[in-house]
Amino acid sequence: MKRRFFLTAIILASVTPLFAGGIFYNSNQSAEYFRTYERNAATDNADAVYYNMSGTTKMKDGLYVNASNQFLFQEATVKTENNSMVGDKTYKSDNPVWLCPNLYVLYKQDNWSAFTGLETIGATAIREWKDGLPSLDLLSLNYSGPGKSYLKGESYYAAWRVGGAYAINNKVSVGAAGRVVYSQQQVEGYIVTGMGNNEFDYTDEALGYSGEINMDLFPVDGMTLSFTYEMATPLEFKRKVNGGKNGGGMITDGEKKRLDLPQALRFGISYNFTEKFRLEFGADAYLEKYANFERLDDPNSGIDSDKSYGNTYEEGLMFEYTLNRYFLASIGFNLTQIGQKKSGTLDTSIPGAHADYRSVGFGCQVTPVDDLKINLGIGVTGFQDTYKYADKNDRAISSLTTKEYNKEYLVVAVGAEYRFM
């Protein structure tokens, strides 16, 4: 039992936050996004390099540079209830992330554009459980004495894209891009045993390639319809044990396992009701049911990724009003339905199993001088409801009862864009 618990804990102790998007996939890729929560049909700013490549053909001619950073304040909790072994206890992780950047460079001329972009495309966060987690504390109890453990994980997915778009006529534009994704995830921690601390420290790295295509339709003046297909990005993570801390022989140096970014479908519709008022709606589907999540398989805890994951869906709606040439304000809403099932949940992973998220964002864009735009966005995301669940490890020990899970995020994003004539 000790061996199985420990193996499960260290395999699944990855950091997988979610603000909007898929389980391992972020759709928050600019400051403009956090003031709207919907950019799939954007044709105004250079963050369209990510959200709507074809829409860049509707922008003014010139060279654009668009950069932003997100400041992430996050809290996750796991609560045990009526637990005779570890007690009624709240485990908390609340580490801020100060650097989550995006950069887009776009050149638009006549009916074509070329662009490149750097993105934090996937799960980017720090999770530190200073008081450990219930499953890890149980391991300590199994050895002797009061339960005590510690766990910290850091994760990021960085992507570089290159592509272009072409306006076939004033009603149809198309775009395509290739993408390179690099991911690194590091996990470290310990459990207290009768012989001292049983430590583990490892780093997983992966490199993958994919592409995407996009088409825009402009059926009437002021309306944009956008359709995007993103290919899956195969990512085979290779594990490196750091400092010989292999959890008492349970971590295998050099082990390779897949954890891909899934295919994604995105749709957006934007309409300018007046010169000042614009509304946009969008919907995304992340096809996680068809992705290779081999790295998350664990028969000992009853987790089979082929059965534990469906598809994730999200819907966004935003309202934008231009007060004058210097200032516009916006508000947006997002609902996300997570494809992970409760059967894929452990307290050492909890990416969001069976939890639907709701988000609201608001902010403004200021244009102090011609060709310079400054964006500020503030977003709040969290579970629509806290949820309770007893995983297989809980049920294997009769004294353990249901755990309660919750996550909340506050994001402040600042960005600037300049157009060179």
Image (cartoon, grey):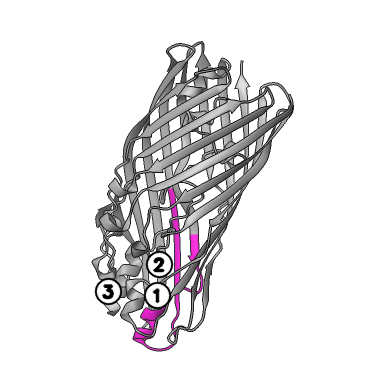
Q: Tell me the kind of residue under disc 1.
A: Leu
Quarter of the figure that contains the N terminus = bottom left
The 10 Å Cα crowd at callout 2, few under 14, some 14 to 19, many 20 or more, is many
Q: Tell me the kind of residue under disc 2.
A: Thr
In which image quadrant can residue 220 be found? top right
Tell me the number on the disc at residue 4: 3
The 10 Å Cα crowd at callout 3, few under 14, some 14 to 19, many 20 or more, is some
Q: Nearer the viewer, residue 36 or 157?
A: 36
Image coordinates for residue 237, horizontal then vertical, percent: 30, 51
The 10 Å Cα crowd at callout 1, few under 14, some 14 to 19, many 20 or more, is many
Q: Secondary structure at mark 3?
A: helix
Q: Which residue is mark 1?
A: 136
Task: Tell me whether circle 1 and circle 2 mark residues in contact (CB < 8 Å).
Answer: yes
Is residue 137 in the magenta section? yes
Quarter of the figure that contains the C terminus = top right
> Which of disc 2 and disc 1 is earlier in sequence?
1
> Which of disc 3 and disc 2 is earlier in sequence?
3
Q: Residue at x 32, y 64 (%)?
A: 11
Range of the magenta residues? Answer: 127-156
Q: Tell me the kind of residue under disc 3.
A: Arg
> Which of disc 3 and disc 1 is earlier in sequence?
3
| Residue 336 visible within the image | yes
Image coordinates for residue 270, horizontal then vertical, percent: 55, 28
Q: Secondary structure at mark 1?
A: helix
Q: Which residue is mark 2?
A: 348
Image coordinates for residue 381, horizontal then vertical, percent: 56, 53
Task: Tell me whether circle 2 and circle 3 mark residues in contact (CB < 8 Å).
Answer: no
Q: In screen coordinates, is 191 left or right of 260?
A: right
Q: Nearer the viewer, residue 14 or 384?
A: 384
Q: Secondary structure at mark 2?
A: loop
Q: Residue at x 24, y 57 (%)?
A: 255
**Is residue 134 positioned above or below 87 on the image?**
above
